[in-house]
Amino acid sequence: MNRDNFSDWLVDASREIGAHSIACIRMDNPILRQRIEENNTQVADWLKLGMHGEMGYLERMLPEKSNPWITFPFAKSVLVLTFSNCWGDPSATHPFPVPVNDALLGYISAYAREVDYHLTGQAMLSKLTEMLGKNIHAEATVDTAAVYERMFATVGGLGVVGDNNLLRMSESGNTRVFIGCLFVDAELPEVIHEAQMPFDCTTCGACVMNCPTGALQLGQPIDARKCISYLTIEKRSSLSRDEGESIGNWLFGCDDCTMVCPPRTVADMRIPVDLEWLLKAPASEIRRTIKGNATAYAGVTQLRKNAVVVLRNMGTPRTQDLLSWVRENTGSELIRRQIDLW
Ligand code: SF4
Ligand code: SF4
């Protein structure tokens, strides 16, 4: 590490580890403290409205999130980086078998292509820790700890939070990006950028218009209970008829508000999955397929629960036959309940 020209060193380091952009914030930065206090109020209000649905962990994590000085007591600085996982790249691969010609299809969000972003980000931050030097103690988080990662990224000037509730990266305005934070015990020189946005969300609104469920509303916080990503990934109990109908053919996540940001023509990068394979293959085969992929967070039962909802939404004799087969053969009470619910 070169402390004398830390800013240039950091740019080179970020290039070497494969990040898009990087900032360094001192934990005693008064703007950081102010932004965390503002965030604490907004998050507490949002939780009070119950918009987090069944994500009780967000309530439980609030005390830790709201006070990083206690959560990471050793930290004197935090490095924040943005990176991608070939999200939206037409060459990005995925581990799911190619569906047969007349397969019944459900879809997985494009961000689940390639290796799970948690693993990619952790590997980048491990490498960065090594580059910082032997005597540095550091803790890395990539959506894996109670940290306001988007807020740290905006304080570091890496972008702004867009109307789709995601980080819009400085300069490109692209929201298909992940964030990692590295809390370190050294007082590093600050490297804070000024976010340059190509245009303001107030002149756009494309994500709000393209959100199929009304989870995004202009000038309102996201209502996670209506968001397809929440319904397919986070909500582990059965889906009501309204919730089920709103997921359409999504098995995991939803690309509708990221595909249009920034507004342009992009390739459809959803992952098509053969529903018959997902429901009939041995669970061990599905588990092997999703190992190391972002969908492993949902797990086999959750993906299959969503698959029966997608079949319900199709409502054809063929889907009804498959549902009857699943009803007979599943070992999951949750899936049986989901089939019988509506
Ligand atoms: S689609 Fe438009 S309004 Fe939505 S986050 Fe992107 S730039 Fe902002
Ligand atoms: S992920 Fe889909 S449902 Fe959720 S806010 Fe975005 S467009 Fe709406």
Image: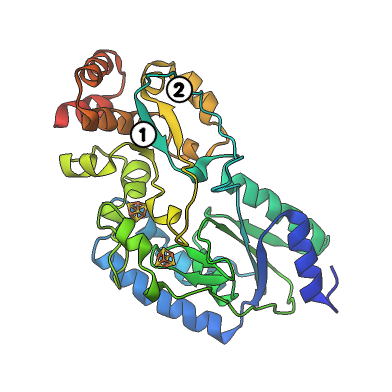
| Front residue of this view, candidates 103 and 9 | 103
- What element does badge 1 sit on? helix
Label located before the other in sequence (2 or 1) = 2
How crowded pointer 2 is (Cα within 10 Å; few <14, some 14-19, many 20+) is rated as some
* Residue at x-position 70% and y-position 53%: 124
Amino acid type shown at disc 1: Gln
Amino acid type shown at disc 2: Pro
Q: Is mark 2 within 8 Å of ligand 2?
A: no
**Pointers 2 and 1 in contact (C-beta within 8 Å):** no
* Screen quadrant of the N terminus: bottom right
* Residue at x-position 77% and y-position 64%: 136
In the image, farthest residue toward the front: 265
Q: Is residue 240 above or below residue 285?
A: below
State which image quarter holds ligand 1.
Answer: bottom left
- Left or right: residue 206 versus residue 51 is right
Report which residue position mark 2 lands on: 99
Residue 254 appears at what percent x and percent y?
Answer: 38, 46
2 vs 1, front mark? 2
* Screen quadrant of the C terminus: top left
- In 3D space, how far apart are the residues under numbered discs 2 and 1 (Cα atoms)? 20 Å
Residue 151 appears at what percent x and percent y?
Answer: 50, 71
Question: Which mark is on residue 177?
Answer: none
Report which residue position mark 1 lands on: 302
The image quarter containing residue 188 is bottom right
* Residue at x-position 24% and y-position 20%: 323
